[in-house]
Amino acid sequence: MGFRIGVPLPRSSRWLWIALIWLSIGMFDASDTVFSMRAEGHHHAWFKLFVTLLLSWLPWALATPAILNLVHRYPLRLQSVAAHLGMCAATGLVFAAWSAALEELLNPWLQIPPPHDFAALTFAKFFNRLVSFVILYASIVAIGCVLDSRQRLALQKTETARLNELLTQAQLAALRSQIEPHFLFNTLNSIAALVRDGKNDAAIQTIAKLGGLLRRTVEGSARHEIALGEEIDFLRDYLDIQKARFAERLRLSIDIPQQLLAAQVPSLVLQPIVENSIKHGIAKRAHGGRIHVAAFRSGGELTLSVYNDGPKLTPNNGTRPAGTGICNIEERLRSLYGTAFSLTIRNENSSGVEVSVSFPFREN
């Protein structure tokens, strides 16, 4: 049996530990006394003496829970000194009297010659025990303060972690709520463009696709991480909507190893990046362009990349295109993984731009 300091124990377990501790102390004291007396040639009823000495420690086993409870309810502060001094004095007086009287009253039973002056000897033993018992009480209070302090610290850490988790969940929910309207408005613009171009059938199909996407988004809104396979399915549906608008101008390729489909990724992590690639790398070119989505694992890290063969980044347009989607992804990654992630946007040597996101690999 074992326990960790700082973790509250059930009441039955506390009583058991207290009983075992005081039983150990009593057995040590009784054994030491009996062996010392036998070494000095006192071969009286040592077993009865052993039992009597054990009984002298019994009140401490009964009082320890009350003392620890007092420490918990009234932590050692200036305002609570009076309560602790009163408890200390009362405990010391009662237990000193109990111990001294117990030994003297049971002396005939233990076959120890009675003292010449019972009252004087009892009085002397009473004060000797009073000093030692006050020290013992103070030791219990000190131990109680340490245990209570560590328990309060553990509870405080647990509560802080819970509040941080709630804050993270709220931040992620707020960030996701930014993505969904952003995605919806851009898709509606695509549908409007199809209608303007007279592609009514394509517009109807796109509306149907949009309905399916929104349904999946709502159904999965409580999850901040999903399987990569689900994310790719969502991305394919989104790209089908974009294909209805761009037709042959949008050329796609997706390279995801089968063994990575169960990896956990932030939901809606790829769609904003692909949307950004279409906006900056495809939409502004008459002949369109190509987008390549890939994933690979390196040790304990998973990397997702989106490449488009559009214009390279220049000092004029910066190294990181502005946009709600990209900035939002970075904030969500920070909320989920702290500093254990990276988001990079770089020019490829030949042509085009690649956006890659790396974070810890884990499976559901």
Image (tube, rainbow, N blue to C red):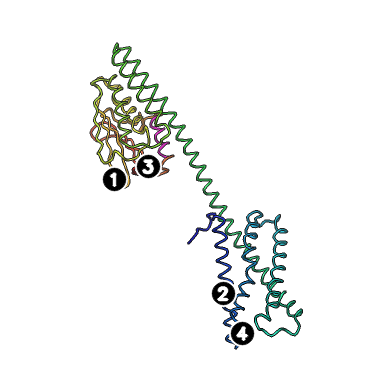
Q: In the rendered structure, which disc, 1 or 4, sits on the residue that comes first in sequence?
A: 4
Marks 1 and 4 close (CB-CB < 8 Å):
no
x%, y% of residue 320? 36, 33
C-alpha distance separating marks 3 and 1: 13 Å
For label 1, the residue is 298
Nearer the observer, 273 or 78: 78
Question: Which numbered disc flags the more N-terminal residue, 3 or 4?
Answer: 4
Q: What element does badge 1 sit on?
A: strand
In front of the other: 281 or 358: 358
Asked if marks 3 and 1 touch (Cβ < 8 Å), the reply is: no
The mark nearer the N terminus, 4 or 2, is 2
Q: Amino acid at mark 4?
A: His
Q: Is residue 247 left or right of residue 269?
A: left
Name the spot of residue 110 as percent of width and height, x first. 65, 81
Q: Which residue is mark 4?
A: 44
Amino acid type of the residue tagged 3 in the rendering: Phe
